Image: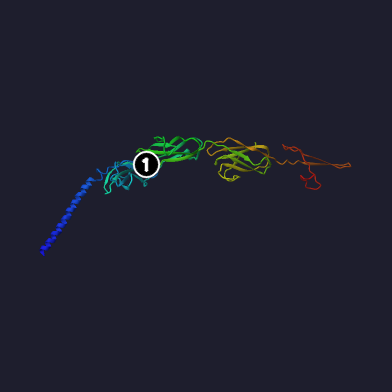
Amino acid sequence: MLIGTQIQLFSKFVFFSIIAISLMLFSVCEKRHAELMTPFGNAFLGAPQNLNATTGDNLVTLTWTVTSDSGVAVYFIYRRDSMQQQPSFLDSSATKEYTDENVVNGNLYFYQVSAVDSAGYEGERSAEIRVRPSVYDIIIEDGKKYTNNQTVTLKLTADLNTHYMMIANDSTFTDAAWEVFAPVKSWTLTPNDGEKHVYGKFRDSEGNINRYPAHSKIELDTRASIDSISENTAGAVMAPGQVIHFKLDAGEPNGKATIDIGNQKFNIRLYDDGDNGDAVALDGIYELDYTIPSGMEMMNGIVTGHFTDRAGNVADDVTAPGRVSIQLDPGAVTLFLSVQSGSSTPAIELYWSESDDPDFASYRLFRSATAGVDTSSK
């Protein structure tokens, strides 16, 4: 029994010795592997290069390059802010691009990137870059919707660390060049009337560029015209209290249309709001149902239309093809009666006050054997 026990103890000793030796060898191998694949300065995973950042409204997008993608499984992104001495792990990316949306406009951030292989060994980190996300904006002509001038004023908003800007009339920035940043700039829009766009890129002292170009638009409108003007009397003589419909077609909404009637009524407003006699709102046709006021009288009055568009352009005046005539009823005269007596044939002599109407032509007399003389009486 003693010999059997000794054999068992010896077997256990050998077994545990083998395990101990194996662990020592594994540790040596791991140490050697770690020395070859240390996080910094290893020969297999070089530090990412050309780390660059583009910024936007509460976001930072990083891009970088590597000498070779071989052996790279993922990239680690590190970040610190201005209050931290050392960066901390932020996230990983399977591509050579990463967008950080957990940032605050105006705050300063520092980034580094490293490559990691499939075994989890990490290479050297890239050089550190500093980034300050910000809001970038372009305002044309103080935010107006329309302008009648091809040359406009731009107001540009960017981070205080912005040194350069690039302005263009198209999103491809064709033929555009970097220039020193200025908060106000005179700019020439592309020719011809229509919707115009202005784009802006901004670059800070670190070389970071806003990821999404700032953008604004405005309508260029350099001319106004009146296509037609009309009234619906068709030559009939109108009277106070009756309604005349006026229509002015300018071809564009949101302007101001007025008419003059003869030499008596001026700057009568027409509407394009679907009311006041206007059939359809905002169709560029301005209309009015005009009730002739009491005391108004004219013959063959010319209707003249005026129009100023939404951008301030003034159209040439246009006159309606027809003419407007408005006539008042003649004023009543005072009738006097004289009866001739002493004759075999009685006579009645009538006389009346003189009419002072400027368009007086003649008097008409009406008689009836009963009360209630009217124009049908003889």
Residue 153 visible in rendering: yes
Is 28 left, or right, of 47 in this rendering? left
Q: Quadrant of residue 292?
A: top right
Task: Look at the image and name its color scheme.
Answer: rainbow
The image shows residue 180 at horizontal and vertical percentages of 39, 34
Residue positioned most to the bottom: 1
Instruction: In this rendered view, identify the residue nearer to me: 279 or 56.
Output: 279
Is the N terminus in the top left, top right, bottom left or bottom right quadrant?
A: bottom left
User: Dividing the image into 4 quarters, which one contains the C terminus?
Assistant: top right
In this rendering, the count of numbered labels is 1
Q: Give the image quarter of residue 211.
A: top left
Spot the residue most to the front: 70
Percent coordinates x, y for residue 18 in the rendering: 16, 55
**Is there any visible trace of residue 266 in the rendered image?**
no
Q: Residue furthest left?
A: 3
Neighbours of disc 1 within 10 Å: few (<14), some (14-19), many (20+): many
Q: Secondary structure at mark 1?
A: strand
Q: Seen in the image, is 186 located left or right of residue 301?
A: left
Disc 1 marks a residue whose amino acid type is Thr
x and y percent of residue 56 in the render?
Answer: 39, 43
Q: Where does residue 244 sit, x and y in percent of width and height?
A: 64, 42
In the image, what residue occupies the spot 18% across and 51% down?
Answer: 25
Residue under label 1, please give it.
54
